[in-house]
Image (cartoon, grey):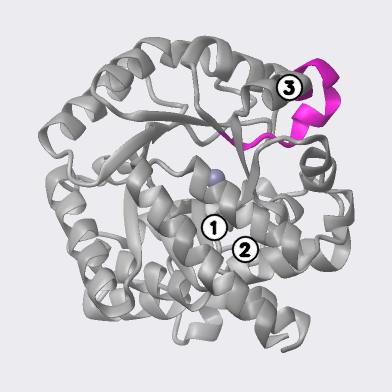
């Protein structure tokens, strides 16, 4: 087996992926056709071309356009199923996929119906591919406290497979602190706590997510590299960092994969894993993320496997499930190594 095939065969977990950012051009085209929507796309290639960006603002523009095409809750079943099918193709065993309900509530979609459709997709994917998945709810950092609380009300009424809350979106403009009360309440509801931080804003954003939101994991965390004290703290507390190298390259957070801090973080002993963030929109998948950091940052197959095991350790599942996954992962890893 060549090294890239071995990397593809590694068992993986995906802890940082956005449901809508996984919307494949083929899925979008069939939704547009089925619903008879007015859109300037005739072919899958037309949509694939649209998923290329000049800068971050352009990316957001495309993202908002896609949201506008989802006018029926039932489509989340297919979107989720197709996302998990792609994950299974990367030998991903477990997924926590982020979903931003406010984006769709604004278009008058119903939360309960959306979550039910996502769960139908999760169940079908489990039957088809044996893949497990849970839901992470993005409270969206441009929301007001009342809006965040409204989403928590909705989660309370429809808790199926929802394991955590997150804040994503415009990081420089909307710092974590105003979400302190919502996170406290989410914790009381038994939800785990994550925040996007240190992607488009400096290390203070990460400190604030820790200080005010008491997060267990950080999404991205790239700018922690600017603050040695923070790096020590993240290491000491073993706060999980979900890093997304290709996404950071596409949005200009790093100039090249070679400059991505995951190598430094890993070598320092921080608890890091890798995610694909918005795989369809960024033309990547988890296999590609692993291959890129192998190619440009010299991650060996043993180190990549450790990144997978870190993901198992960071996952929001109970200990018995973690132990079972670890056994399966070790078994598959030994098989890959024996296959040479
Ligand atoms: Zn993200």
Q: Are marks 1 and 2 in contact (CB under 8 Å)?
A: yes
| Residue at mark 1 | 278
Q: Position of residue 87 (x, y in %)?
A: 46, 69
Identify the element where label 2 is drawn. loop
Task: Let me know if residue 95 appears in the view.
Answer: yes
* 27 relative to 214, above or below: below
Q: Position of residue 173 (x, y in %)?
A: 60, 23
274, 147: nearer the viewer? 274
**In which quadrant is the C terminus drawn?**
bottom right
Give how far apart the Cα atoms at labels 1 and 2 are: 6 Å
In what quadrant does ligand 1 lie?
top right
The residue lying at 65 percent from left, 51 percent from top is: 244
* 217 relative to 50, above or below: above
Decide if ligand 1 comes within 8 Å of the CB at mark 1: yes
Give the number of the disc on residue 203: 3
Identify the element where label 3 is drawn. helix
Left or right for 162, reference 195:
left
Q: Are marks 3 and 2 in contact (CB under 8 Å)?
A: no
The residue lying at 17 percent from left, 38 percent from top is: 159
- Mark 1 or mark 3, earlier in chain: 3
295, 157: nearer the viewer? 295
Give how far apart the Cα atoms at labels 1 and 3 are: 23 Å
Which class describes the residues within 10 Å of circle 3: few (<14), some (14-19), or many (20+)? many
Q: Position of residue 291 (x, y in %)?
A: 73, 70
Residue 199 part of the magenta-drawn span: no
Q: Which residues are magenta?
A: 218-231
Give the number of the disc on residue 282: 2
The residue lying at 32 percent from left, 72 percent from top is: 130
Left or right for 183, reference 235:
left
Q: Nearer the viewer, mark 3 or mark 2?
A: 3
- Mark 3 or mark 2, earlier in chain: 3
């Amino acid at each position: 087996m060549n090294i890239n095939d071995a990397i593809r065969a590694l068992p993986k977990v995906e802890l940082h992926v956005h449901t809508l950012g996984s919307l494949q051009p083929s899925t979008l085209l069939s939704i547009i056709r089925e619903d008879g929507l007015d859109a300037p796309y005739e072919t899958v290639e037309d949509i694939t071309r649209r998923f290329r960006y000049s800068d971050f603002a352009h990316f957001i523009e495309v993202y908002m356009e896609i949201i506008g095409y989802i006018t029926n809750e039932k489509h989340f079943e297919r979107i989720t199923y197709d996302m998990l099918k792609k994950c299974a193709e990367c030998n991903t065993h477990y997924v926590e996929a982020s979903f931003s309900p406010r984006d769709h509530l604004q278009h008058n979609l119903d939360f309960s119906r959306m979550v039910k459709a996502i769960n139908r997709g999760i169940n079908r994917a489990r039957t088809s591919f044996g893949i497990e998945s849970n839901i992470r709810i993005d409270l969206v950092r441009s929301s007001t406290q009342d809006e965040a609380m409204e989403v928590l009300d909705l989660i309370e009424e429809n808790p199926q497979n929802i394991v955590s809350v997150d804040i994503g979106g415009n990081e420089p403009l909307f710092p974590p602190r105003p979400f302190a009360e919502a996170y406290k309440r989410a914790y009381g509801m038994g939800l785990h706590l994550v925040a996007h931080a240190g992607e488009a804003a400096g290390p203070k954003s990460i400190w604030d997510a820790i200080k005010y939101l008491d997060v267990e994991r950080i999404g991205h965390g790239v700018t922690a590299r600017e603050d040695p004290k923070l790096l020590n703290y993240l290491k000491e507390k073993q706060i999980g960092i979900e890093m997304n190298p290709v996404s950071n390259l596409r949005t200009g957070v790093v100039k090249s994969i070679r400059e991505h801090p995951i190598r430094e973080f890993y070598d320092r002993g921080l608890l890091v894993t890798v995610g694909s963030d918005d795989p369809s929109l960024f033309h990547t998948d988890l296999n590609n993320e692993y291959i890129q950091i192998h190619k440009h940052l010299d991650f060996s197959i043993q180190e990549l496997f450790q990144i997978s095991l870190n993901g198992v350790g960071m996952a929001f599942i109970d200990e018995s499930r973690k132990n079972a996954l670890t056994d399966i992962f070790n078994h598959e890893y030994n098989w890959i190594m024996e296959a040479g």
